[in-house]
Image: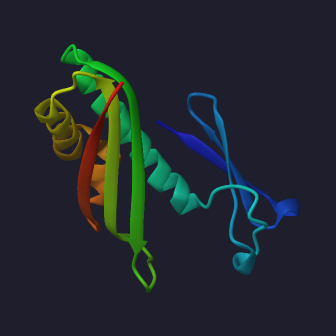
Amino acid sequence: MECTINWVPASGMAFIAETGSGHVLTMDGAPDGGGRNLAPRPMETVLAGTGGCTAYDVVLILKRGRHDVRGCQVQVKAERADTEPKVFTRIHMHFTVTGKGLPEAAVARAIQMSHDKYCSASIMLAKTAEITTGFEIVEG
């Protein structure tokens, strides 16, 4: 896996990342750090990537279990250290999983499997952050 990040000098503190799979992602800084707030902060993209990683796992695990999953939303909230490096210290992920007749045990198991075994992003972040999860199931 690889990624190339280029600073866009005329923008202040914006950066364009091109991923090895050929996709582009823009990041920017806060105005108090020289940015113009035109794109997510780099640490926001880390958090978003982690949420995407675990949501992917949960959906895939439920589908492989032949469950009728129709939606998955993860709301991720994080706290960071007050001093440099301002690593994530606490992360809470709340899953809202929608489907027909989804067993609570299957959803809980999928989340736990992602957290413990499959989501490399959250497993890495767990080295500095306490990660907690919660979920609700919506019939639909």
Query: Is residue 3 toward the left or the right of residue 5 in the image?
Result: left
Where residue 43 sits: x, y (%)? Answer: 52, 61
Looking at the image, how many numbered discs can be counted on the residues? 0
Residue name at image x 64 percent, y 56 percent? 40
Query: Is residue 68 toward the left or the right of residue 79 in the image?
Result: left
Where does the C terminus fall, quadrant-wise?
top left
Where residue 14 sits: x, y (%)? Answer: 74, 59
Which color scheme did the rendering employ for the protein?
A: rainbow
* Quarter residue 76 falls in: bottom left
In this view, 63 is above or below 20: above
Residue name at image x 72 percent, y 80 percent? 32
Where residue 70 sits: x, y (%)? Answer: 38, 22
Identify the residue at the far bottom of this view: 83
In this view, 50 is above or below 88: above
Residue name at image x 48 percent, y 49 percent? 48
Query: Is residue 102 toward the left or the right of residue 18 in the image?
Result: left
Identify the residue at the far right of this view: 10
Nearest the viewer among 18 and 108 is: 108
Where residue 5 sits: x, y (%)? Answer: 65, 50
* Quarter residue 21 falls in: top right
* Quarter residue 139 falls in: top left
Identify the residue at the far left of this view: 105
Residue name at image x 48 percent, y 54 percent? 46
Query: Is residue 94 toward the left or the right of residue 73 in the image?
Result: left
